[in-house]
Each structure stands twice: as structure tokens, then as C-alpha cells.
Amino acid sequence: MARMKQSQVATDVIRASVELFALRGYANTSVQDIVARAGVTKGAMYHYFESKDDLLFGIYDSLLSLQKDNLDAIIEAGGDVDDVLRAACVDVLETSIEYLAEGTVFFRSMDMLSEPRRKEVVRRRRAYNDEFAALVRRGQREGKYRDDIPLAVLIAHFFSDVHYLSYWYSEEKPEDRTLTAVHITDLFMSSLRRADVEYTSAGDDASLARHNAR
Amino acid sequence: MARMKQSQVATDVIRASVELFALRGYANTSVQDIVARAGVTKGAMYHYFESKDDLLFGIYDSLLSLQKDNLDAIIEAGGDVDDVLRAACVDVLETSIEYLAEGTVFFRSMDMLSEPRRKEVVRRRRAYNDEFAALVRRGQREGKYRDDIPLAVLIAHFFSDVHYLSYWYSEEKPEDRTLTAVHITDLFMSSLRRADVEYTSAGDDASLARHNAR
Amino acid sequence: MARMKQSQVATDVIRASVELFALRGYANTSVQDIVARAGVTKGAMYHYFESKDDLLFGIYDSLLSLQKDNLDAIIEAGGDVDDVLRAACVDVLETSIEYLAEGTVFFRSMDMLSEPRRKEVVRRRRAYNDEFAALVRRGQREGKYRDDIPLAVLIAHFFSDVHYLSYWYSEEKPEDRTLTAVHITDLFMSSLRRADVEYTSAGDDASLARHNAR
Amino acid sequence: MARMKQSQVATDVIRASVELFALRGYANTSVQDIVARAGVTKGAMYHYFESKDDLLFGIYDSLLSLQKDNLDAIIEAGGDVDDVLRAACVDVLETSIEYLAEGTVFFRSMDMLSEPRRKEVVRRRRAYNDEFAALVRRGQREGKYRDDIPLAVLIAHFFSDVHYLSYWYSEEKPEDRTLTAVHITDLFMSSLRRADVEYTSAGDDASLARHNAR
DNA sequence: GATGAATGAGGATTCATTCAT
DNA sequence: AATGAATGAATCCTCATTCAT
């Protein structure tokens, strides 16, 4: 997240708000709760943030920026559609796990954003989705991915996994993070392949093997 | 959903609350909003429901009951694991689409449930998950489904789609409902197959064909 | 107390209300609580009583009537002032113990009576007090009771004991009832005697002895 | 009562609540009534007090603390049991008159306290009672006080007067306060004396005289 | 930069009572 | 006589935000 040199107060408040919003939800967290957890006073908080909504939007903003920047970079790097798509999937899954608390808030508290901000979030998510969908589309045009199922369904099929992480993922070992990202990516790629294409299982095995070898 | 002979007041209040909770979230919906939309007085509402939380829990309860009963019946009916699992997937997807508003509330408002009720919902969802997981496990033992990925990941991979429906599904034609359920089921079944097993594409094509033919 | 042939519903409701008002106070008892305890419906209750306030006033009314009638009879019977006063004291103490729950309500819930009824209760209590005070006055005129302390203080000194019963009295044996009434009466009579009068202790010993002998 | 440096808001709210609770009872006094009389806003009140119950408990707490501290000091000072007991009686009567409104609330609104607080009040009152009873017990062992009546009755006989003050006491002249305390104490001490002991009336006369001379 | 007292609008809930049946 | 659904006014309390210091 690309904020520069924030004051300690701001940093503490942001951390406290993410934790609390993820834990009990935005509506069940009072500004008083946040400042108490951050160890600052209400006045101090309002010096750095305009409103409670600001804190919420900050969470959306930083996660959207990070993932969008990463996706742009991956696409920029180019390569085989399979490799690019795989990299994109792994990245969004990995960052979603790294910022799991933010993700929890992301999907559960959109209703609580002020209307203009909710619209901005929707717009930026759509931009991400479209960029991602273009990759899948390219794979379809290259005859690699199935086209018997609507593109929207395919895309939703992937993002549902990203979304759902906060409902079940719980880390036991640090390496679970990448492993899970790879597993889910493999599942998605498996379901994406043309069903009528003779396909060796090399892809899956190779990718899993690659990671196991690290 | 099988409640009989509810008073008109209760029916209207439930409908209004589902709509509003789905639309703007539980926290942004006042009891006043609900009774206004239902066209009843606050007192009348409190004659039938103990609290706002009651309305929320009712939504969870009815959806959980319906889907659990259906799953039990499907498993009871028995058959090839592929067919049973497929039927289970299609059913939960179809009912989730039918009760899309309820599902929206389900996944977004769990934080707002009172603690004991949240625990009950978690318990019942877990029971559903376990029953579903047992099916996948059976397929793995029969050598049909891949076991190179943790069972928990496989299960999450499916439920993420159920969960995510309310974030993207929008019906244009009534037949979309079953079609989408089948599409997602196919994607899941595709990703579930053993990667190293020689597999004809008959399954997918057949199932889609079957539905298209109805 | 002197109510004639009340319906079962009315009787049950009155009993339930006395018990609940004494247990948790008038304000903490809802009409719903009362009818539930009485085993009747709200409609039935409102058929017999105009309001919740009616139930409360009924308690005052019956206790005031009973004690006033008794006092009148005792005075009517006549006799030595010491004996009459003693009989009056014992009676009000005994009936207050018998109707302890009613007494609890009496002293704790006067604020909850509607204004006109509160005034009536005050008037009737005042009448009782005045009649009782006249007895003490008579004793003072006869030179038996001290007059170095204002009459109002002497009277309050007695009624305080009646009042306070509900705060401490707890019956272990049925005979405690009369015994306690006699004890308190003795204490009162002891303190009433002219301090400068040579006085044999016969009175006290005799009265206690009389009771012990029964 | 010894709270220092309370904000003006807190002071005003406490005063208003004592007055109103004493006047019409806790249940008939709304928070709105209190803040209106105190001339503050509801929000300001809730900045200083957690709940309406807090205000009520504050009244109990301050009166219990004051009287307990005084009793401890009187016993600490030591002396003849008659003098110590007399001082204890006069003190609790005088302070009860000084804080008559608080006392009114004390005895009439115990039902309205939250359960844990009600229990604490009962515990602290019991501690006071026990300490007082120990004094009377000591007098009995010294052969000064009658023991033909249960100790519990003797103690109740005294506290009933304290309790009852709010039902009848009304001050005309400031000196009534101490005079009444002495009168009631004399009545109690009179009734406490062994009935079979030759007793000169010097005690009473002397004590009244002492006070009149101040 | 920071404090924390104060605001005031709103929200969930309770409950005595009424009334059509 | 009895039911119990419905009313609607009142009540306690919460909380994001402001502002004087």
C-alpha cells in the first residue's frame, strides 16, 4: 500500500480499524472502539481522517490499488496467455491472503460506504475484472479455453474463490499461502480448459511440482 | 420457507426485511423502514417478532433448512457419486439463485446476528459442508476425484461459487437460473476430476445437452 | 378481604398481581406478566379491571378497609387506654404480617398510583393515624404517656415498625406472627411510658407472659 | 457525598435526579425529565453516566458510604456502650434527615436497581446492620439492654424509624433536625432498657437537656 | 497537533390499552 | 365473557461529529 510517511497516529488508527472491521463488522465498531484500540484520542483521529467512512474507503482504496498495479505489471510483462493468466490468478490470491483482514472488510462492508465511494469502488473493481476477462477471452480466441460457458460465469467462477478466502482460509504454515494460491489457480485452470481437447496433465503436475521444489 | 398460515403482517414484514437487508444491509435498515415498506405499524411487527435480530435469523433459518432438507433427500435417493454430487451442486446453486436476496443477506450480515444465533448458523452451515464433503471424499476413495489438493480447498472452491452468486448473478431469462447452476456445476466437476486420468469429454457435453433438451 | 363472590378470573388476577408487585415492584411488572401468572388472557383481565392502576388500588383499598374496620371495632369495644392501644397495635401488626405482600406493595408503590387515588389513600391513612393518635393523646392526658416528645414523633415511631415489617420479617414458625406483634408492641409501649414515672415492669412481663401461656 | 471536582453537568444531573426520583419515583421519571431539570442535553448526561441506573446507584452509594464511614468513626472513638450506641443512632438519624430525598429514593426504589447492584446495596446495608447489632449485643452482655426480645426485632425496631423518616418528617425549623434525631434515639433507648432494672430517668432528661443547651 | 466535553439526531424496544370478532 | 391482534406514544440509549481550548 503506497501511503508515504504517515504519522504514527494515522498508521495505528488504520491498523486498528482494519482489525476491528474485520472482526465484528463496520457497523458494530464505533469510532470510540477504534481510537481505544489504536491508543489515540478521538480528536487526534479526526485530525487525520475526515470520517469513519474515510477509514473504510482507505481499506478499499489500498487493496484495489495494489492489485490493479500488480495486474498491470503482469500483463505488461507479457508472455503466453496461460502463463500470464496463471500469474494474475496467483497474484490476486496471494495478495488477498496477505491482506485477508482487508478482504474480509472489502466483501462484507460495501453497503456501508457512502454512495459516491461505493460507485468508485464498483468502477475500479469492474476495471480489474475487465482486464482479467480480456485475458480469458484471449485464451478462448486462441482456442485454449472453453467457450461453451458464458464468459461472465467463467470470470465469476474465479473471483468467487478470491472472495471466499476470508470465509475459510486459516493459515497454519507460512508456505500455505502460496500453496493455496496455486491450488486454487490449478482448479480454475483445470475447469477452464476446453473439455474436448486432448490434454496432458503436465500443466498441473508441473506447476505443483515447481512450487513444491522451492 | 415452509411456514404455513402466517399472518399477513408477518409475511409482509419478512418480505420487506429481506428486500431491504439485501438492498442496503441490515445496519442501514431501520425497523421503521421495514414497517413502512411492509405497510404495518411497529407495534404489529413486534407482536410477531421479538426483535430486529429475529427477522435476520429467520432469513438464515429458512435458507439453511431448505438446503439441508434438499441435500438430505438427494443423498437419501442415492446413486453414482458423480450423479449425487452433481445433483447436490445444482440444487444448492438453484435454490441460492431462487433466494438470491436471502443469500445476499446471508453472507453479508453474519456479523449482525446475536452471538448465540451466529454460532447456531455456523454449526448448521458446518453440518451442510460436512455432508457435502463426505460426498467428495467418497469420490476420491473411488478414485474418481483428485486428491492432490486438500479436501478443504476443494470444498471451498465449490461453496465460493454459491456464495458469490449475489455479487454478480442477474437474471435475464428464467431459464438462466438452471443453466447457470449447471454451468457452475460443470466447472466444479471439471476441476475435480483426476488430472492424470484419461477422460472423455462426454460427461460435460452430456450434462449440458441433457439440460438444453428439457 | 371483603369482596363478594368474585369470578375466578378476578381472584386469580388479584393474587398474581399482589405477588408480582411485591416481588419485583409495580413498574417492573407488565400486564402480560400478570395475566400469564394468573393463567388468563389479557382480554379477560380487562373485562374485570379497568386498568393496571385498578389492580394496585385494589391492594391499597382492601388493606386500608380491613385495618380501619378493625381499629374502629377495637375502639368501639372500649376499655383502659393501655389495653385499647395495645390491642390496636397488635392488630395492625398482625394484619400487616398476614398481608405482608400487600404491605410491601403499599409502602413501595404509592408513587405509581394515579393522582386522585394517591390522594384518597393518603386521606384514609391519615384518618387511621388520627384515630390512633387520639388514643395516645388520651393516654398523655391521663398522665400515662410521656409528653416531652411531640405526638407526631410518637405516632411515627409506632407506624415505622408496621411499615418496616416487609423489609425484614420472615416467618419461620406460625406463632412468630403474634409473638412479633407483641414484641414490637411491648417495645413501643415501653418507650411511650413517662420516663419520670415510677413504673413497675409488670406490664411488659405480664403481657409477654400472657402470650407465652396461650 | 465527598466527590470532588465533578463537572457542573454531573452535579446538576445528580441533583435533578435525586429531586425527581424522590418526588415521583424512579419509574415515573424519564431521562428527558432529568436533563430538562438539570438544564443539560441528554448526550452530555450520557457522557458522565452510563445509564439511568447509574444515577440511582450513585444515590445509594453515597448514602451508604457516608453512614458507614460515620459509624466506623463513632465505634473507633469508643466509650461507654450507651454513649456509643446513642451517638450512632443520632448520627444515622441526622444524616438521614439531611439527605431525606436520598433516603426516600433509597427505600422506595430498590426494585429498580439492576440485579448486581441491588445485591451490593443489600450487602453493604447488612454490614451496617451487623456493626450496629454488635453494639446492642454488647449492651445486652453488659446487662444493660433487655434480651427477652430477639435481637433482630430490636434492630428492626430502630431502623424502622430511620426508614420511616421520609414518610412523615417535614422540617419547620433547622433545629428540628437534631431534636428529632434525639427524640427518636431516646424512644429507642427507652424501649431497649431492661424492663426489670431500676432506672432513673436521668439519662433521657440529661440527653435532651444536653442538646437543648447547645 | 491534540483534547475530550458536548451535541442532537436517530434507533430499537416496551407496554397499557383498545377493539373487532 | 373472552380472545389476541393491533396501536402508538413513550423510553432509554448510541454515536459520529464538532468545537472551544
Image: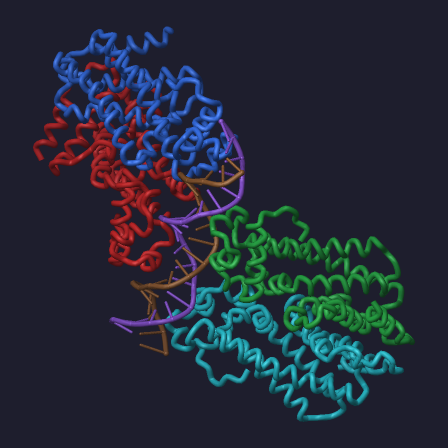
Chain colours: A cyan, B green, C blue, D red, E brown, F purple
Q: Is residue A8 above or below residue B69?
A: below
Does residue B73 appear left or right of residue A88 in this picture?
A: right
Does residue C8 appear left or right of residue F20 in this picture?
A: right
In the picture, residue B114 is in which quadrant? bottom right
Position in image of residue D26 (x %, y %): 33, 43
In this view, the residue farthest toward the left is D213
Foreground residue among C210 and B28:
B28
Q: Is residue B162 above or below residue D202?
A: below
In the picture, residue D171 is in which quadrant? top left
Quadrant assignment for the C terminus of chain B: bottom right
Position in image of residue D153 (x %, y %): 33, 23
Q: Is residue A185 above or below residue B207?
A: below
> Quick check: can you spot residue D78?
no
In the picture, residue B182 is in which quadrant? bottom right
> Looking at the image, which residue is at 57% across and 50% down?
B8
Q: Is residue D32 above or below residue D180?
A: below
Does residue C65 appear left or right of residue C139 in this picture?
A: right
> Looking at the image, which residue is at 73% across and 64% down?
B94
Position in image of residue C17 (x %, y %): 43, 30
> Quick check: can you spot residue B106?
yes
Position in image of residue A171 (x %, y %): 67, 69
Does residue D101 appear left or right of residue F15 in this picture?
A: left
Foreground residue among B107 and A11:
B107
